[in-house]
Image (cartoon, helix red, strand yellow):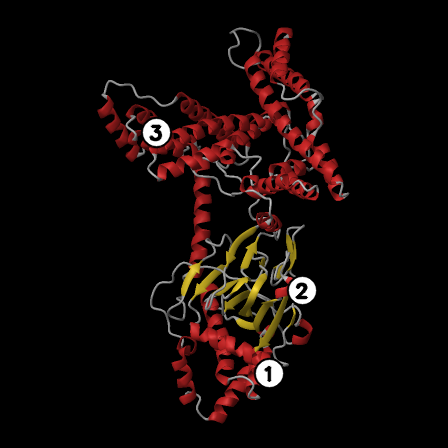
């Protein structure tokens, strides 16, 4: 034991990443954040950089010590008959623990337990949060190049962060900022090599592709080993219930060991997920081998191509195209030529299968779950009873998908010429859709003329400061006010009628798509224009409309949305029918519940209708209108008849009264309107074709029987 300890200490000294004591990164981080909020920018920058250095040093020390102690206190190779099995096994376990404690203590300069940070702190470092603070500190210190690098490093891992996106754009416009300042300080080498290799591959530059893909594969396998080593950390107790009975010796050992194995298995997903992305690249390691075998074949190196093909077949042994390629390679190389898979890939597959077998045994006999990260796991490895559960889960997920698709396909769209250009899947959410072709250009122009005439009329459509931002003015027109202005001769009757028709057409489309067979009533209809205040756009950082949900009060911190007053709790669906696109900004975006992670964006244009459910599943906002005037019809719907829009009933009565007075409900005036291009709004024609894929849009605000009380909140 003494000789073993000496060897470990020597290894620790050789592997030490920095002399002296390594201060725990969570303490440095906490002090750095305190200095940040105290506006002590110099100290904040120093402490945050030291925290990042300490975090990297701790990970490096753990990797080095676990690798060293794995060699020096190996579990295999014990001579037979060395004593009772417990002494043979746990003696080595104790030696490994002793080696790790001394190695880490030597490298860190303190007890390893001092470096156990909270889950929240670890998550901040995994998400590169210190760089968010650093970029502000460096900016205040006039260190622009370092501020840009810190901002870019954070943004790479958090591409949907709204504030950082604006900061990055601000940096790009600054004089003195160079393109090479936008560096990812945490860049992982395998991603750069992989993407460059794929680019060469797609450009038929196979020699260059081979070099970069081989580099990527080497880096991937190395990164996997580092990730797996870090899995051997403290037990992560997922259940904080103090009253729960603690497991016994062997149950505790088994539970912690299986936790480590599951962590190791998930490493491939971590390595295959590009910073800033949510989903991992499927079959990341097999895809390297597939690309390499083809590239080597193209450059005439069939021997290495065959080796790559044989390695790929370790993952998918029955893959017919690859088996056919192997036959061709054997013909070229000669049947007597031995073709074997790469040793590193053999080791990877064998070890992974061993771990999966142990995990599935534990799940079957001890309980728990396992989300297998690999598509290539052999079916025979999964226990029969788990196969059934796996099939049930897949069927349930498939049925849920079919249910969603079924809702979409219950009825055709009630008008021809309308296309579903984005659906919920494409918009990374639920109950979202975007339709194009709802209005023609001539109809958009007529409705824009209505907004102009209403503004000139005075009290019906006065421009005023937006309640959401001082940088814009907005004008709002209800259907009833439009009819009253038409009655007074201030606007064209046909334009006012078109507002009614366009909103009703939108209602029928949304009802047929989301709730066929279940009536949707208007809750509020509002023709709204937002105009950028030219002299107040410089340095603007706010939104045209902050992120919100339409029928509940959004609580980003608590990840909740409270469906209670003053929210419009009776809203069920929302929509925006756009009239123009000759302005800058003003696009709609959806976010996660945190209000900062953007999941989808929709750009306005004439005749585009965005529709979505009004609940917490669809938080949304509007980018700033930075130039020009954005006009749209904001629509809200409800299944509750008691909350139906009363102003609309009065507006329709005025329209009927006008028709009676004219004594030509379908006469010459309406024919003239048809010739002006409104037939698509006035004549609902059932669609005979299948409905294309869907898309989503976003609503604005709402209006009830008490318009004056809600005026400040009811426009979008």
State which quadrant residue 681 falls in. bottom left
State which quadrant residue 394 falls in. top left
The residue tagged 1 is 457
- Give residue 548's position: percent from left, percent from top: 62, 59
The tally of labels here is: 3
Q: Circles 2 and 3: CB distance less than 8 Å?
A: no
- What whole-number distance in Å separates the C-alpha atoms at marks 2 and 3? 63 Å
> Is tag 3's residue or tag 1's residue first in the polypeptide sequence?
3
- Give residue 476's position: percent from left, percent from top: 60, 74
The residue tagged 3 is 313
- Give residue 402's position: percent from left, percent from top: 42, 54
Q: Nearer the viewer, residue 234 or 539?
A: 539
User: Are there few (<14), some (14-19), or many (20+) residues within 10 Å of tag 2?
Assistant: some
Residue 243 in sight in this render: no
- What whole-number distance in Å separates the C-alpha atoms at marks 3 and 1? 76 Å
Q: Which secondary structure, mark 2?
A: loop
- Give residue 271's position: percent from left, percent from top: 50, 34
- Is the C terminus in the top left, top right, bottom left or bottom right quadrant? bottom right
> Is tag 2's residue or tag 3's residue first in the polypeptide sequence?
3
Q: Which secondary structure, mark 1?
A: helix
Task: Report the side of 707 relative to 377 (left or right).
Answer: right
Query: In the figure, 510 relative to 171: above or below?
Result: below
Which residue occupies 62% across, 23% down? 61
Find residue 470 and name its label. 2
> Is tag 2's residue or tag 1's residue first in the polypeptide sequence?
1
Task: Report the side of 590 relative to 672 (left or right).
Answer: right
Q: Nearer the viewer, residue 537 or 333?
A: 537
């Amino acid at each position: 034991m003494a000789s073993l300890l000496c060897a470990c200490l020597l290894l620790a000294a050789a592997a030490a990443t920095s002399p002296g004591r390594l201060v725990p990164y969570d303490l440095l981080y906490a002090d750095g954040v305190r200095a940040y909020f105290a506006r002590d920018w110099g100290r904040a920058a120093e402490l945050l950089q030291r925290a990042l250095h300490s975090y990297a040093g701790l990970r490096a020390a753990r990797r080095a010590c676990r690798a060293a102690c794995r060699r020096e206190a190996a579990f295999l190779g014990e001579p037979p008959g060395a004593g009772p099995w417990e002494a043979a096994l746990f003696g080595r376990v104790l030696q490994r623990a002793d080696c790790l404690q001394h190695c880490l203590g030597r490298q860190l300069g303190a007890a390893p337990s001092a470096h156990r940070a909270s889950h929240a702190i670890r998550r901040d470092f995994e998400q590169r949060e210190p760089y968010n603070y650093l970029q502000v500190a460096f900016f205040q210190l006039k260190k622009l190049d370092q501020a840009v690098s810190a901002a870019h490093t954070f943004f790479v891992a958090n591409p949907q962060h709204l504030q950082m996106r604006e900061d990055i754009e601000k940096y790009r416009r600054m004089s003195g900022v160079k393109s090479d300042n936008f560096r990812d300080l945490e860049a992982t080498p395998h991603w750069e090599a992989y993407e460059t290799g794929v680019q060469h591959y797609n450009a038929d530059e196979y020699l260059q592709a081979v070099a970069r893909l081989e580099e990527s594969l080497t880096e991937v396998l190395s990164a996997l080993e580092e990730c797996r080593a870090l899995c051997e950390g403290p037990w992560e107790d997922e259940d904080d219930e103090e009253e729960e009975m603690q497991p016994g010796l062997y149950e505790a050992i088994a539970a912690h060991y299986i936790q480590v194995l599951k962590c190791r298995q998930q490493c491939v997903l971590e390595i295959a997920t590009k910073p800033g992305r949510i989903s991992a690249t499927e079959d990341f390691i097999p895809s390297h081998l597939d690309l390499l075998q083809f590239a080597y074949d193209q450059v005439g190196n069939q021997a290495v191509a065959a080796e790559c093909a044989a390695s790929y077949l370790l993952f998918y042994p029955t893959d017919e195209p690859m088996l056919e390629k192997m036959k061709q390679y054997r013909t070229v190389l000669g049947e007597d030529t031995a073709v074997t898979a790469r040793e590193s890939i053999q080791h990877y597959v064998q070890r992974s299968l061993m771990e999966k077998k142990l995990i599935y045994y534990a799940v079957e006999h001890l309980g728990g779950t396992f989300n297998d990260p690999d598509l290539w796991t052999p079916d025979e490895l999964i226990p029969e009873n788990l196969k059934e559960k796996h099939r049930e889960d897949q069927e349930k997920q498939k049925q849920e998908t079919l249910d969603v698709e079924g809702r979409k396909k219950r009825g055709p769209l009630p008008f021809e010429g309308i296309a579903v250009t984005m659906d919920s899947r494409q918009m990374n959410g639920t109950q979202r859709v975007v339709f194009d072709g709802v209005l023609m250009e001539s109809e958009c122009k007529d409705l824009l003329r209505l907004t102009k005439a209403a503004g000139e009329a005075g009290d019906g459509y006065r421009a005023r400061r937006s309640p959401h931002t001082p940088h814009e003015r907005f004008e709002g027109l209800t259907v009833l006010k439009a009819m009253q202005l038409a009655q007074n001769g201030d606007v064209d009757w046909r334009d006012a009628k078109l507002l009614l028709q366009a909103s009703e057409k939108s209602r029928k489309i949304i009802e047929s798509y989301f709730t066929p067979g279940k009536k949707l009533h208007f809750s509020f209809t509002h023709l709204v224009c937002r105009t950028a205040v030219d002299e107040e756009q410089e340095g603007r950082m706010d939104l045209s409309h902050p992120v919100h949900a339409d029928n509940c009060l959004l609580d980003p911190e608590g990840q909740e949305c409270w469906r209670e007053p003053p929210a419009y709790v009776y809203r069920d669906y929302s929509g925006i029918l756009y009239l123009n696109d000759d302005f800058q900004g003003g696009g709609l975006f959806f976010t996660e519940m945190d209000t900062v992670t953007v999941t989808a964006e929709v750009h306005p244009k004439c005749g585009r209708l965005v529709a979505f459910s009004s609940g917490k599943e669809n938080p949304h906002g509007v980018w700033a209108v930075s130039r020009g005037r954005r006009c749209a019809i904001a629509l809200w719907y409800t299944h509750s008849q008691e909350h139906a829009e009363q102003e609309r009933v009065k507006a329709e009565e005025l329209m009927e009264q006008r028709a009676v007075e004219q004594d030509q409900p379908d006469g010459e005036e309406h024919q003239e309107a048809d010739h002006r291009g409104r037939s698509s709004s006035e004549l609902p024609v059932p669609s005979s074709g299948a409905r294309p894929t869907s898309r989503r849009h976003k609503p604005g605000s709402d209006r009830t029987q008490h318009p004056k009380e809600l005026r400040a909140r009811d426009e979008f």
